[in-house]
Amino acid sequence: MKGSLWRRASLVRLTYALNCRLLTGAINGRNLKILDVGCGTGCISLELSRMGHDVLGLDRSKRMIEIASRTKKTSNSGSGKLQYELADFDKWLGTTGTYDVVMFSRLLHDLPDPEKALLKAHRLLRSRGKIVCLEYAYNTMDKKTAAWLYQTRKPLELQGWFSSPQLPDDPDKGVDFIMREAVIGRKEHINTFEEMNRPLKRLFHQETFSWHPYYFWFILSDMRIPNPRLEDRLAAMVKKLEEFLLGTGEIQPALFLYKGTKA
């Protein structure tokens, strides 16, 4: 927990809890059957079951499924049925036409073949079933966005309040470093926005689409301010600043929420 956003409840409220509200808020209806692909620690699956839905959470990480199962045992799971299964979605079969909702939360960008994954989701959905995706589009970052991250992160580093490797003092080199880290220099392939959006548009009828702040997560994850009250204030301010800059079009967004109906 020490090296993550889970180290402080206030940081969880600004990040994971916000994502949870975005996803649960996209689910309309009662007593639905929901597949949560890449359920992680199971927090969202648990919340959906508390809303009265029957939820199956899949994850290929044994550790994540163990955490999710522990949380289920120690928490009120509500009136809906809640199950977790250790499985790789690419290899998992599932039953055709079973689910009212298939949900991807920050997973689709990391799958080897997003079109294949969405075709499977399409098959698993009932007629008029819904797809809900909260996804990270890393390739949308531009130099203005990288410059804002540099301006935010470098003063924290100079104060000794940032745990990641130091950025160069030269702003040009610092911005280039952030661009390489996020976009250009990735060794592994991460799906672009277009690689995810193309099959979504082909397989589903879009109901809602929205962009949301996300880069502030990277600041909050490695920020280490000794005074907890000051850290809370600065964390909230960085999030609000990203929201403001997105609203004015000064920086590019990275996190999108998509909801569509099976075509």
Image (tube, rainbow, N blue to C red):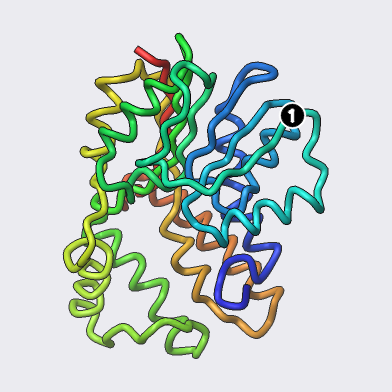
Q: Quadrant of the N terminus?
A: bottom right
Judged left or right of residue 128, residue 30 is: right
Q: How many marks?
A: 1
Q: Residue at x 30, y 20 (%)?
A: 203
Between 115 and 21, the residue placed more toward the observer is 115
Is 196 located above or below residue 99 in the figure? Answer: below
Percent x, y for residue 115?
A: 26, 33
Q: Kindly identify the amino acid type of the residue bearing the numbered disc 1.
A: Gly
Q: Residue at x 55, y 28 (%)?
A: 26
Q: Residue furthest top?
A: 127
Q: Quadrant of the C terminus?
A: top left
Is 79 located above or below residue 40 in the figure? Answer: above
Percent x, y for residue 34?
A: 57, 28
Q: Residue at x 61, y 77 (%)?
A: 2
Residue bearing mark 1:
80
Q: Residue at x 80, y 29 (%)?
A: 79
Q: Residues within 10 Å of mark 1 (few under 14, many from 20)?
A: some
> Which quadrant of the structure image shows residue 67?
bottom right
Is 153 located above or below residue 165 in the figure? Answer: above
Between 224 and 33, the residue placed more toward the observer is 33
> Which quadrant of the structure image shows residue 195?
top left
Between 152 and 263, the residue placed more toward the observer is 263
Label 1 residue SS: loop
Percent x, y for residue 210?
A: 42, 33
Judged left or right of residue 98, residue 48 is: right
